[in-house]
Amino acid sequence: DEAVFISRCVYGSLSPFVKNVVDRSLAYVHPDFVKRYGEMHHRRRYKNTIKCSFYFYGDVSETEKKTAKKVMQAFMDNFYGEIKEIKFFKTPGEMEGIEL
């Protein structure tokens, strides 16, 4: 039902390692493209809708937070999913006790 991503925020996006995991999950969508929202996106492969939560940590500026929200929304648009929540923390330790 839900995927949870925990990553250091790097220039308003996922860390290179986590981004690599996301890129390798493209098999979840169809390789052919369709036009949605005036943009090219992969065609939907499955009928379910995946929900994702994104937890970022690091010294994140307000600009990076805005960028991260836009990038994660674009990611979810391509995967036909929805964002459950996006939160930002200074350190990974601050995430302890979060209910997933």
Image (spheres, helix red, strand yellow):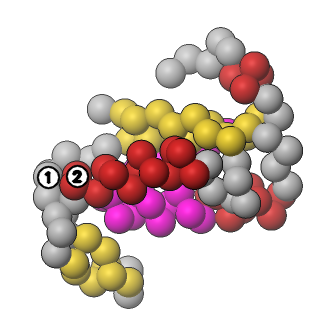
Residue 27 in percent (x, y) is at 22, 55
Residue 55 in percent (x, y) is at 62, 37
For disc 1, the marked residue is 46
Tags 2 and 1 touching, CB below 8 Å: yes
Which is nearer the eye, 22 or 74?
A: 22
For the N terminus, the image quarter is top left
Name the mark on residue 22: none
**Dot 1: element:** loop
Give the answer, above or below, for where 78 lies relative to 37: above
Residue 24 in percent (x, y) is at 33, 52
**Dot 2: element:** helix
Which is nearer the eye, 35 or 16?
A: 16
Query: Which range is magenta?
Result: 70-87
Kindly identify the residue that appears in the image at 68 percent across and 15 percent down.
Answer: 96
Kindly identify the residue that appears in the image at 75 percent across and 19 percent down.
Answer: 93
Spatial distance from mark 2 to mark 1, Cα to Cα? 8 Å
State whether residue 29 appears in this view. Answer: yes
Give the answer, above or below, for where 85 lies relative to 22: above
Residue type for callout 2: Tyr
Of the image marks 2 and 1, the number of the one nearer the N terminus:
2
Kindly identify the residue that appears in the image at 31 percent across and 50 percent down.
Answer: 25
Name the mark on residue 28: 2
Residue type for callout 1: Tyr
Residue 99 in percent (x, y) is at 56, 17
Crowding near the residue tagged with mark 2, few <14, some 14–19, many ≥20 C-alpha atoms within 10 Å = few
